[in-house]
């Protein structure tokens, strides 16, 4: 009997000491498309020996704790941000997750020690061939072409993971996300029908300390300059002083370069006290800085963040894409997925700018849910470190084109934008005119089909939905994260491009404008010895809710409908409204 017990205990110890062999050939689908994403076409099979960098996003062990810290808004805690090391402690994968994923890599002939590990090990990058990736993910890779952008990528229509990996891996890329640097949508456009002005020397003096919105000249309803915005949003008398601590970051993509000579011309014509001011360019993943090729989007962003926040230091992040696919090249290519490149780069820095603005996006349904979730979670990490992150809401109202779902049903539904729909960013819609401001018709707005409505929005959004009644019933997800959160002017911006002034519109103008105001609020807080605002949404829907100019007219048509209509309180056209710096300074400064 004793011998039997000893034998049993010995066998039990062996069983505990030796892990059970994983079934790497037992697959479950992770994500699949019913049809090729709009704008893309099948070009050819991917060469089996073509190599690329596979990125694997691991499940983060304590991400729920990070979100709890992010949403903390009580007066005793708000503004107590986490350090890089504290964030990494929360997002590092569990050791068991690392072991399982490393075993999977080894089973396919890959050496785990050769992998690059970022973000506390929660992202792995390793070079694989098409043949290896196809086996690992039980899929077939092809080369696809984007007709409009003439861009070629190696992607797949679906991919699977061994069943045992699903609880450990959030996403693998590149797989089913077809978005690339060239196919991304910038949310700005030239407006040749609005005659540009050479300068605002006649108007600008009238806008200093205007006293009330009623004194803002009617010319600002047609052409927007920094003086118009500083008057409208009550920042014209504020002079930043915390310029040794405060920074405003602009995320740039699409080979768009911010031009220094154009910025000086802009200052000479539209903000003379800033002449000589400049910005820093940080190049990410091979991003360029071609001063002979000024970008409309890049110049719009930097000229208006600088035009409002001067002399606050501005940083332009020029994020590069991967080289084009070359069938006969064995050189590994990057994934060409810009959000991941930019986010992992910024999160790896010891300190980050307190304010960011980004003016790009995609239709939410074109971004696989697993990919969107991982990217959105990275924005949460940036927010909890003390950064306020603004995104333009898009320029298609409630949706552009035929608004058909891409799940095979072709059902017509409003089409939200991503990352605008991510609950961890502050999304900025657009307005036009002054005395009063009204919603601009292209202002992107609606409700996410991926992300649930966060609790801080409940009161404001429920009030809107109750008033809306049955209008647009069945066309949107009533329980989804609602956006935009706020708004700012979005049309007739005077931008210097190649030495000449042009009129530019889009919520790409609204986002840097709002970011400029937030940068000033952060300056004020830092000058008072306080922390930066960080993630804005919980506080603007509560303590700061009365710091906005409520926009109560205008709508955002799309999808063959009138869209939504702006009304008192929050609405999915202009959010809570446009900022009043003085009021916000008193409420949350």
Image: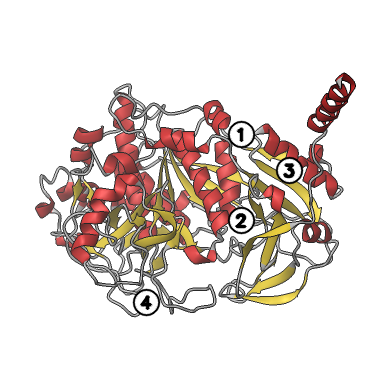
Please, what secondary structure does the residue beneath circle 4 have?
Answer: loop
- How is the structure coloured here? secondary structure
Contact (CB < 8 A) between labels 1 and 4?
no
**Residue at the image position 30 percent from the left and 73 percent from the top:** 557
Task: Identify residue for label 2.
Answer: 337
Whichever of labels 2 and 4 marks the residue nearer the N terminus, that label is 2
Q: Nearer the viewer, mark 2 or mark 1?
A: 1
Residue 308 showing in the rendered view: no
| Cα distance in 3D space between marks 3 and 4 | 43 Å
Residue 185 showing in the rendered view: yes
Task: Identify residue for label 1.
Answer: 92
Task: Identify residue for label 3.
Answer: 101
| Cα distance in 3D space between marks 2 and 4 | 28 Å
Q: For the residue carrying disc 3, how many other residues have a C-alpha within 10 Å: few (<14), some (14-19), or many (20+)? A: some
Q: Nearer the viewer, mark 2 or mark 4?
A: 4
- Say which mark, if any, is on residue 559: 4
Q: Nearer the viewer, mark 3 or mark 4?
A: 3
| Cα distance in 3D space between marks 1 and 3 | 14 Å
Whichever of labels 3 and 2 marks the residue nearer the N terminus, that label is 3
| Quadrant location of the C terminus in the rendered image | top left
Whichever of labels 1 and 4 marks the residue nearer the N terminus, that label is 1
Whichever of labels 2 and 1 marks the residue nearer the N terminus, that label is 1
């Amino acid at each position: 009997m004793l011998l039997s017990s000893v034998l049993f205990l010995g066998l039990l110890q062996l069983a505990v000491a030796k892990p059970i062999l994983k079934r790497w050939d037992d697959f479950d689908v992770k994500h699949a498309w019913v049809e090729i994403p709009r704008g893309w076409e099948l070009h050819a099979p991917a060469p089996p020996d073509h190599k690329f960098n596979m990125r694997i996003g691991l499940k983060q062990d304590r991400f729920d704790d990070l979100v709890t810290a992010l949403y903390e808004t009580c007066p005793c805690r708000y503004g107590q941000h986490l350090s890089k090391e504290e964030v990494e402690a929360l997002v590092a994968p569990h050791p068991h997750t690392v072991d399982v994923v490393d075993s999977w890599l080894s089973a396919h002939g890959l050496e785990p020690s050769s992998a690059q590990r970022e973000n506390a090990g929660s992202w792995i990058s390793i070079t694989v061939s098409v043949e290896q990736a196809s086996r690992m993910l039980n899929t077939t890779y092809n080369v696809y072409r984007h007709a409009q952008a003439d861009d070629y990528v190696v992607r797949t229509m679906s991919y699977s993971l061994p069943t045992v990996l699903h609880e450990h891996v959030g996403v693998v890329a590149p797989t089913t996300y077809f978005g690339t640097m060239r196919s991304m949508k910038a949310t700005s456009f030239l407006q040749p029908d609005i005659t540009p002005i050479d300068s605002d020397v006649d108007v600008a003096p009238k806008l200093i300390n205007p006293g009330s919105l009623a004194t803002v000249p009617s010319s600002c309803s047609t052409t927007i300059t920094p003086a118009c915005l500083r008057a409208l949003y009550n920042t014209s008398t504020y002079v930043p002083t915390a310029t040794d601590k405060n920074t405003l970051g602009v995320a740039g993509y699409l080979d768009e370069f911010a031009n220094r000579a154009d910025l000086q011309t802009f200052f000479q014509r539209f903000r003379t006290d800033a002449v000589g001011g400049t910005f820093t360019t940080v190049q990410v993943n091979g991003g360029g800085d071609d001063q002979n090729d000024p970008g409309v989007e890049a110049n719009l962003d930097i000229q208006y963040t600088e035009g409002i926040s001067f002399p606050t230091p501005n940083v332009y992040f020029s994020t590069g894409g991967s080289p084009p696919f070359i069938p006969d090249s064995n050189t590994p290519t990057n994934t060409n997925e810009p959000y991941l490149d930019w986010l992992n780069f910024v999160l790896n820095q010891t300190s980050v700018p307190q304010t960011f603005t980004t003016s790009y996006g995609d239709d939410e349904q074109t971004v696989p849910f697993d990919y969107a979730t991982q990217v959105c979670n990275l924005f949460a990490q940036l927010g909890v470190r003390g950064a306020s992150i603004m995104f333009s809401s898009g320029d298609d109202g409630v949706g552009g084109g035929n608004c058909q779902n891409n799940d095979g049903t072709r059902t017509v539904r409003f089409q939200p934008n991503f990352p605008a729909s991510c609950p961890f960013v502050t999304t900025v819609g657009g307005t036009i005119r002054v005395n009063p401001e009204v919603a601009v018709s292209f202002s992107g707005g609606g409700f996410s089909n991926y992300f649930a409505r966060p609790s801080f929005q409940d009161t404001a959004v429920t009030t809107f939905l109750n008033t809306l009644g049955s209008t647009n019933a069945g066309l949107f997800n009533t329980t989804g994260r609602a956006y935009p959160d706020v708004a700012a002017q979005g049309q007739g911006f005077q931008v210097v491009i190649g030495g000449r002034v042009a009129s530019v519109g889009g919520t790409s103008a609204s986002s840097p404008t709002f970011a400029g105001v937030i940068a000033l609020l952060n300056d004020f807080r830092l000058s008072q010895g306080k922390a930066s605002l960080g993630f804005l949404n919980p506080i603007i829907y509560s303590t700061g809710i009365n710091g906005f100019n409520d926009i109560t007219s205008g709508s955002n048509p799309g999808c063959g409908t009138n869209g939504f209509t702006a009304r008192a309180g929050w609405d999915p056209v202009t959010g809570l409204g446009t900022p009043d710096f003085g009021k916000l300074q008193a409420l949350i400064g």
